[in-house]
Image (cartoon, grey):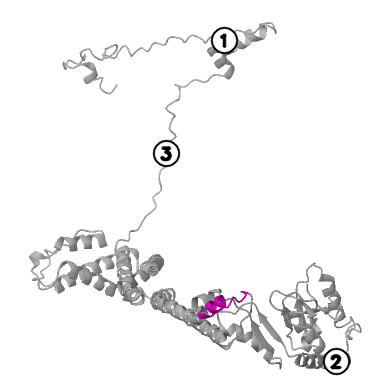
Amino acid sequence: MMVRKPNEKEMTMGEGKAVLAVGAIMVDMLCQVPRLPRSGEGIVVEESRAVVGGCAFNAANVLRQLGAPYELFAPVGCGIFAGFVERELRERGLDPDAEPLTEDGEPNPALPTDEQRADALAEAKRVCAEEHDQVIAAGGLTVIGTERHESRRIDNQLRGRAGRQGDPGTTQFYLSLEDDLMRLFGGNRMDSIARMMEKTDMPEDMPIQAGMVSKAIEGAQRQVESMHFAARKNVLEYDDVMNLQRVAIYSERNAILDGKDMDERIPEIIGDAVEAVVAENCPAKVPSDDWDAKAVELWAANMTGRDDFSVAEVDHDDDPAVLSEALEAYLEDVFASKSEQLGEPVMKMLEGQVMLRMIDTRWMAHLQEMDYLKAGIGLRAFGQRDPLVEYKNEAYNAFQNLTSSMYEDYLRTLLRLQVAVKQEQPALAEDKSPLDGKVSYSSPEQALEQTGVGAARKQAAASPSGAPAAPPKPAAAKPQTYTKDKDDPFANVGRNEPCPCGSGLKYKKCHGRDQ
């Protein structure tokens, strides 16, 4: 329901700004009772009345009295209080159909004037002061809670709402000894209180109020708050590990999107990849006879798609650094030839696109692996190890493997790029069907006549209605004879007869083997 919307003139009066009040319209039932009821006790209400309220409604009502531009959106509904709310809105001057100004630009007489607004404001202040004095004289506001919250902050907010109204008020909470808050965090005091109630045969619903109980409840709340704080802090520490990796990955990705030139990184990527493979297969201070030269050559062939690199042709003198320089020079020459073949503009575009694709695919897989690691890392606490420290170590190793494999795959993709040329295929001649001339078609009537079903139907139609028709006899199959070509020398030769070719073998093992 839109109660009121300012027009253009009113918007200019308010410097082009209007207050938008959005919320539900509440109906408060105020009941007057002689005293507070006890636990499980019913009490008769002496007087009750309904009052329309709600944050949005109260804000719009104040703005209307002050003459400020506003707009109120609030659901009214169709319940038992819908008519009461609408009447209350119209009595307060919140008429949906009322306009602040007439067509001539004059104030609407149906709306209150400035003097009426001032009088209404003074009357409202007087009524509020009287009600405040009545509440103070009756003992102040009382907040009753059926249970205490796990956080002391929530309970203090209930007290603060009464205090902000100039009334210190009182609070009363009812909490069971079997509540999770007391059962888990109450301590030995709650156990002693429970044993005392059992010894003295006190009723279970008898309220107990003592400073010891209140302190025990406060201590339990403090323990719960500290537990939740530690849990949130632990989650934040785990997230900080992934945040560092996320910053590194996305900084590289954003740099590529901003137009970063990858040509400067290519020699560095080649050097890191070559250094890793040479250090693994050709360790220093080891004779070249013990090197795994075949693994280096296979790695170079896998990276480039070529097999023209040989470790034996390199004059390394058992020095892995010389072999690394030769392999780097070989890969740079392959990359230069690819750039010359594709063209520099095309190569630069492909460098950025391929790197973005590698980052996206590998990063998503890495996130899944880290989720699996985080789900089971807590089990290492059984081995007297800190799960957070273990998670940091594993995350670091996983990120190192991610970057090394990502850049290696990136280099392999660039070195194995090929230019695909789309060739136009000639139109194929229309082939004749192999069944042409060998398949005959017949109508359904002809098929019925050949199988004898048609004759049986005619006989059944000609027979008297009272006499049952004889079942149709199946039509005799026509003998079919397969005659081979007369010019064929192997015609009419039995499979166990000697082959006519003169080989001395049986026909089924010679020329009749495939038949």
Judge whether residue 483 is colored magenta: no
Disc 3 designates what residue? 428
Q: Secondary structure at mark 2?
A: helix
* Tags 2 and 1 touching, CB below 8 Å: no
Disc 2 designates what residue? 123
Nearer the camera: disc 3 or disc 1: 1
Nearer the camera: disc 2 or disc 1: 2
Q: Secondary structure at mark 3?
A: loop
Which residue is at 71% across, 92% downward? 167
Q: Residues within 10 Å of mark 2 (few under 14, many from 20)?
A: few
Above-or-below relation of 419 to 355: above
Distance from disc 3 to disc 2, alpha carbons, whole Å, reads: 98 Å
The percent coordinates of residue 199 (x first, y second) are: 55, 77
Above-or-below relation of 161 to 43: below
**Kind of residue at badge 3:** Leu
Disc 1 designates what residue? 472
Above-or-below relation of 338 to 463: below
Residue 120 falls in which quadrant of the image? bottom right
Q: Residues within 10 Å of mark 3 (few under 14, many from 20)?
A: few
In this rendering, would 304 be left or right of 63?
A: left
Magenta region's main secondary structure?
A: helix
**Kind of residue at badge 2:** Glu
The percent coordinates of residue 213 (x first, y second) are: 56, 84
Q: Which residues are magenta?
A: 192-204
